[in-house]
Amino acid sequence: MKKIVILLSFLLLCSSASIHAETKKEIKSYETAVLLMNEGKYKEALPILKELIRNNKEYIAPSWTLADLYGRMGNNEKKIATLAYIAKPNLPHYAATLLRLGKAYHETCDYEKAMETYKTISPSDATFYKRAQIGIKQCEDALEFVANPVPFHYRNMGANINTEFDDYWPSVTADGSLFSTTVKLNKRQGESEFGKGVHEDIFLSKKVNGAWGKTQNVGRSMNTIGNEGAQSVSLDGRYMFFVACDRSTGLGGCDIYYSIREGDSWTPAINVGSPVNSRHWETYPTLSPTGDELYFASDRPGGIGKSDIWKTKVTIQPDGRLKFSDPVNLGPTVNTKEDDFSPFIHADNQTLYYSSKGMKGLGGYDIFVTYKQENGEWSTPKNMGYPINSCRDEFGFVVNAFGDKAYYASDGQEKNGKGKEIYELDLTEGNLIPVKRMKFATGKIVDATTNQPIQATIDVFSVETNKMVFRSVSDKKTGDFISCVPENEEYGVNVSKKGYLFYSDNFAAKKPMKLKDVQGKETSSVELDKIEVGKKMTLRNIFFDFDKATLKKQSYIELNHVAQFMKENPTVKIQLSGHTDYKGSAEYNMTLSSERAKAALEYLVKKGVPRQRMEFKGYGKTQPIADNSTEEGRALNRRTEIMIIAK
């Protein structure tokens, strides 16, 4: 959400600074034109400024303001012509006008003309000369990017995503089923930001039969007659974060809010509160795929530049509401002395895109990418290159979970007179894709007895590193969930709900995510059993060294879930049972399975679970759940189970 500052006092200062006399009538007319312009009455301000210029060419302020007005109206040709008309050595404020003219060329990507104009400014005009040298260097940098373009193939998202008004801030779920945008209602290209009825609202489109449906206003749960925008939908579509300004529930000018999806509706907006929101400016929120970090931009004290990227720890409560910790600045590698904002953390939780004007670029705000290293530090940010970046401002850049498509807003790609529109960018060429490709699974969590939907917590973790890669909750009304994981890694899944046995699953690398029932058959639903004596669950992420009872470290996170389950249900007692396939003698398998069950029990004891609440038993190959004639079936039979023996 953009902060708009009306520079009336500055413009009047420029007027009074003129060394040539202006009549009181001229000054009064100029003040009237500026007020009309700031009220969005462009057509009314235009003839007043033109008349002032005709009557007194040496009264420079009206010409500067007229050029600014043409810029707001999207007419850059007239903006440049107006400035060029008064860029004369014999007129007042020559150096200042040249600087404005150079910037006008720069902002239309005419880098050669911009440099030519900047170089006209004399070193004797020290302040303007210094600024011109900065402009020359920026143009040289831009030309270097232009000479080395990156692959760039885009398409307009079309009338179902784009409206007749300005559209920006795209966001998309992992499965590509929801697409959200900010729409500036009643604002068309060349029209005022302050016209009647102009305000920002959040819109949402759903994909139906492979095509995006007509985008719709999300309604009163989030939108008001004020401004709401800079939204981002979580990977699983469960949360919508957004920014609202000047609300009675706000702590500062602009605050971060969120809403939780329940079926086809959204809960009333919830202010994330202190310490994330403050009396300063907080905006551009984006939730990490792990669900435990929120990135955002703020101009709060303690930063490095004017606006910095920050992050805060997030805890998802069982009811889906969120708790936030003290924010931490991302540091000087990411943040600059200028404005850094519009962060987007990709589904791989390693690739961060954001906008900045504090590094080598093409002009205005450019999009940069940085990568989280093994030690948690960020790599040196890289400019995404030309023509993704241009002389204009680029921000609101997001990438889908698979990493092959990006979405962004622009008012300059097609110059179709429709203002800002949403575009889809192909990332399959070049080195623009994120660190990891991701894949996703969808499903439903239900009560095993009643088949009624359950709101439960979904944890997805890397088997190799034991690190969490995704966390969320299922839909309160429908039980639906989406989980997103790295494509080329083995990972485990735990689904938990208080009062129920948790669900455990394991997914191999480079294979589609397919949920499995107790017998290992594919299913679209996760059925959770209430805690009852005799109920069993399979721990699919317990691993042992070959032909041994030595636990592999990849088993630890699964057993930690068991320990947490036991702590949350302090009266429950369990039996840990080991099972094998048919290979080997009955006696050998019985011994091996017993020792493996005991190893799991001993780990839980070390984690604080009282020994008297657990027992272990080996069943060898006596209780197969799948066909022993196939490797897949034998793998299912080699398992560790839990059975409730007391509650």
Image (spheres, rainbow, N blue to C red):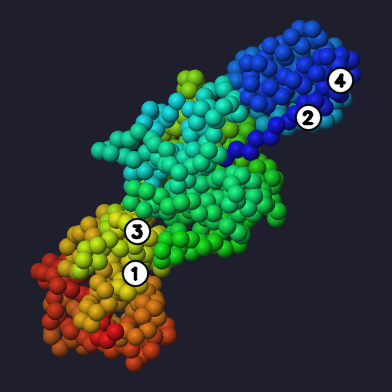
- Cα–Cα span, label 1 and label 4: 72 Å
Residue tagged 2: 10
- Cα–Cα span, label 3 and label 2: 53 Å
Q: Position of residue 328 (x, y in %)?
A: 61, 59
Q: Is residue 431 visible?
A: no
Which of these two is toward me, 431 or 96? 96
Q: Is residue 124 above or below residue 591?
A: above
Of circles 1 and 4, the one toward us is 1
- Cα–Cα span, label 3 and label 4: 66 Å
Residue tagged 4: 18
Q: Residue at x 37, y 74 (%)?
A: 561
Q: Amino acid at mark 1?
A: Lys
Q: Residues within 10 Å of mark 4 (few under 14, many from 20)?
A: some
Q: Position of residue 359 (x, y in %)?
A: 64, 41
Q: Position of residue 242 (x, y in %)?
A: 51, 47
Q: Amino acid at mark 3?
A: Lys
